[in-house]
Image: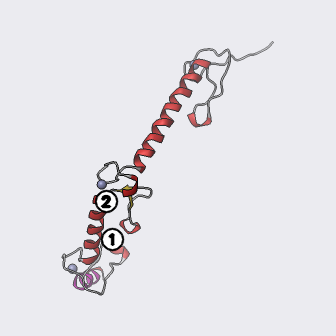
Amino acid sequence: MQFRKSQTCTLCNRDIKFKYKPEKSWNITGYLCSDCHMKTTKEFFVKQQEEEELLIKKQNQCFICHNIIDEDKKKKARWQWRMENDIFLCEKCYDKKEQDYQTKIDFCVKCGKKIGFIRYNPKPKWKVDGQLCRKCWDAINAAQN
Ligand SMILES: [Zn+2]
Ligand SMILES: [Zn+2]
Ligand SMILES: [Zn+2]
């Protein structure tokens, strides 16, 4: 006696005459019939193209205002701004961001007072994003102890 389990297509459940192995990237187990294989190949091709287009768009688009930036006007975000990698900003947003950043490092985040030459960096455990003036630093430090 011979057992021959007939192979069915994972997607449409029809018996397969000629079985096709799905591509690894499709995340499909089992085998596909030729129709489904062809259809999935096409779908993934379109999806891949869309992803590529999106990537190209992302590389030409300002991360903040989403305007398309000319190649020679692209600006990379400064690492101090702690933004995502591989993003670009237009000149306007870059300048704004830079200004915000300068404001942030020149003024106390607590009271808004301009900080002098000596910087008081908050301790990491305070979870303060920015700089502090001496008075606020002392106040937080005292409160923490
Ligand atoms: Zn099928
Ligand atoms: Zn912009
Ligand atoms: Zn302060």
Mark 2 and ligand 2: say if the CB distance to the nearest ligand atom is below 8 Å: yes
Between residue 75 and residue 36, name the one nearer to us.
75
Q: Is residue 134 above or below residue 3?
A: below
Q: Which residue is tagged 1? A: 127
Tell me the crowding category of disc 1: few under 14, some 14 to 19, or many 20 or more residues within 10 angstroms, Cα based: few
**What is the quadrant of residue 116 in the picture?**
bottom left
Residue at image coords 66%, 19%: 7
Secondary structure of the residue carrying numbered label 1: loop
Region of the chain picked out in magenta, as a range: 134-142
Magenta span: helix, strand or loop, mainly?
helix
Answer left or right for 89 relative to 104: right
Which comes before the other along the chain, label 2 or label 1? 2
For the C terminus, which image quadrant?
Answer: bottom left
Residue at image coords 36%, 74%: 125
Residue type (three-letter) at the residue carrying disc 2: Glu
Residue at image coords 36%, 57%: 73
Between residue 100 and residue 138, name the one nearer to us.
100
Across and down, in percent, residue 76 comes to 40, 61
Q: Depth-wise, is mark 2 or mark 1 nearer the camera?
A: 2
Secondary structure of the residue carrying numbered label 2: helix
Between residue 99 and residue 40, name the one nearer to us.
99
View quadrant of ligand 1: top right
Between residue 77 and residue 118, name the one nearer to us.
77
Across and down, in percent, residue 25 comes to 58, 37
Which colour style is shown?
secondary structure
Q: What's the distance in space between the residues labelled 2 and 1, CA to CA? A: 31 Å
**What is the quadrant of residue 56 in the picture?**
top left
Q: Which residue is tagged 2? A: 91
Confirm whether the magenta stretch covers residue 129. no
Tell me the crowding category of disc 2: few under 14, some 14 to 19, or many 20 or more residues within 10 angstroms, Cα based: some
